[in-house]
Image: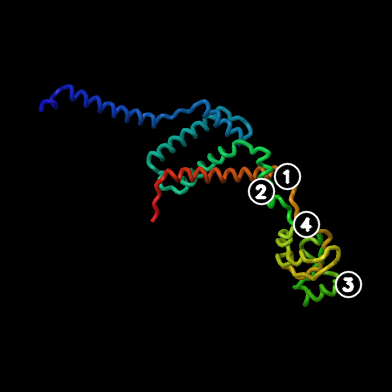
Amino acid sequence: MRWPREPLVYFLLAGVTLFFVSGIIDSSTEDYRIELSEADLNRLSDQWQAQMGRLPSTGELDGLTEQWIREEVLYREAMRLGLDNNDVIIRRRLVQKLTFLTEDIATSEPAPPDALRAFYDDHIERYTDPDRYSFSHRYFSSERREDAEVDARAALADQNVPGDPFMLQRNYAERSLREVGELFGREFAESLAKLPIGKWSGPIRSAYGWHLVDIQRHLPAAPREFGEVTNKVSNDLRLKRREEANRAFYEDLKKRYDISTP
């Protein structure tokens, strides 16, 4: 065969080799080129101003620029070495950034008023104030008395019988049963809800001892007016839209993958 000796064959081979080598060199050159644009400088300046409350000086901007270049160089070398592989922190951060991007796109436009109203009507329980109680109490300490319950019962018949000092308040206004339970214990809150209004009653037990209670007012649970909670409704709907967007985005991406599990 004579074709290996033909000069044209060697010329073609050399041309193909030069083409691939040129591509590699150009790609490598691109990898090592760092261009800092005017927009990048403005961004660095804006970030400084947001943190410091003033524009950076020339020296400070030079320092910010050098820091940015240093980070870019080290970042590229880290990526070139594959240091991002199997790194849980980087993995989670990238997932978080993609999630934020999806959420921002989904909530870029404010919800129209009719959507807000519909969400409010469909989730009225979120915007309903619970039962609230205004009451006073007299405290009888189980630690200071031999039988605080008996003493409390005696004091119910004689209002002149003194109670004991109490570390919290004596009077409470418009407290929900959850709030009462956080202060006195759930047993006290449950018992308080069963007491009559307008007179001293009890005694009922708390986490501290025994109490006589006078409920002055009971406000039944009632939904708040839409106008009072519009901002909260808007925030709740935005959160719901973000969750739905993330779920739909993930499900769409998942369909593209062939997933096998043991």
Residue 226 is marked as: 1
Q: Quick one: quadrant of the C terminus?
A: bottom left
Q: List the residue tagged with mark 3.
A: 158
22 or 59: which is nearer to us?
22
Tag nearer the camera, 3 or 4? 4
Is 111 situated left or right of 161 in this image? left
Q: CA distance from mark 2 to mark 3?
A: 51 Å
Residue 58's place in the image compared with 209, above or below, is above
Q: Residue at x 32, y 28 (%)?
A: 23
Q: Earlier in the sequence, mark 4 or mark 1?
A: 4
Residue 176 found in image quarter: bottom right
The amino acid type, in three-letter code, at marker 2 is Asp
Residue 136's place in the image compared with 232, above or below, is below
Tag nearer the camera, 3 or 1? 1
Q: CA distance from mark 3 to mark 4?
A: 31 Å
Residue 260 is marked as: none
Q: Quick one: quadrant of the N terminus?
A: top left
Q: List the residue tagged with mark 2.
A: 122
